[in-house]
Image (tube, helix red, strand yellow):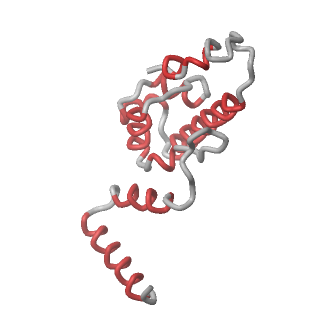
Amino acid sequence: MTFDRDFPERRGGGSDGGGGGSYDPRDAAERRYMNDLGQRLKRLREERGLTQQALARISAVAADMISRLENGHYQSPGLRTLLRLADGLGVGIGELLPEAQGLRGAAPTGGGSGRARLFALIKRVSDDDVEMICGILESVLRARPPG
């Protein structure tokens, strides 16, 4: 799946008929987003002391794709690729993805991000720890006034 095939207007052959001469502010927002994604990927990888080759082995994603992502030269990673990278880094996909600002159809941020982080963390702990966390949550809920 390529970005141009899925969005033919990006090739300049879209409805404006101008052969790519028109400016679409989403293009700049998409480039910023992919650069931010690449920077996050690199930071998370380096924080874990991993080389691109090591992350490639762990995540089953080609090292050259990781390099292109980190350098902003790969513009359309698939969901499977992002999930594999996040899993290889031991993070939830929400920690890997930057907030989408200026992109059409961007998901609202803020309200659900804590839950996504919690679910990502829960996947990484033992069953005993999950039981302890459930106990803590139940205590918090009991301490709240009804309403």
Q: Is residue 67 left or right of residue 119?
A: right
> x, y percentage for residue 127?
25, 65
Q: Is residue 102 left or right of residue 127?
A: right
Q: Is residue 114 left or right of residue 84?
A: right
Image-quadrant location for residue 35 = top right
Q: Is residue 23 left or right of residue 41?
A: right
Quick one: which residue is furthest to the left in this view?
127
> x, y percentage for residue 14?
61, 16
> x, y percentage for residue 1?
43, 21
> x, y percentage for residue 28?
70, 30
Rendered residue at 74%/14% (across/down) = 21
- Quadrant in which the C terminus is drawn: bottom left
Rendered residue at 34%/56% (across/down) = 124
Rendered residue at 49%/49% (across/down) = 94
Relative to 19, is 144 above or below? below
Looking at this view, is 135 or 4 the one in front?
4
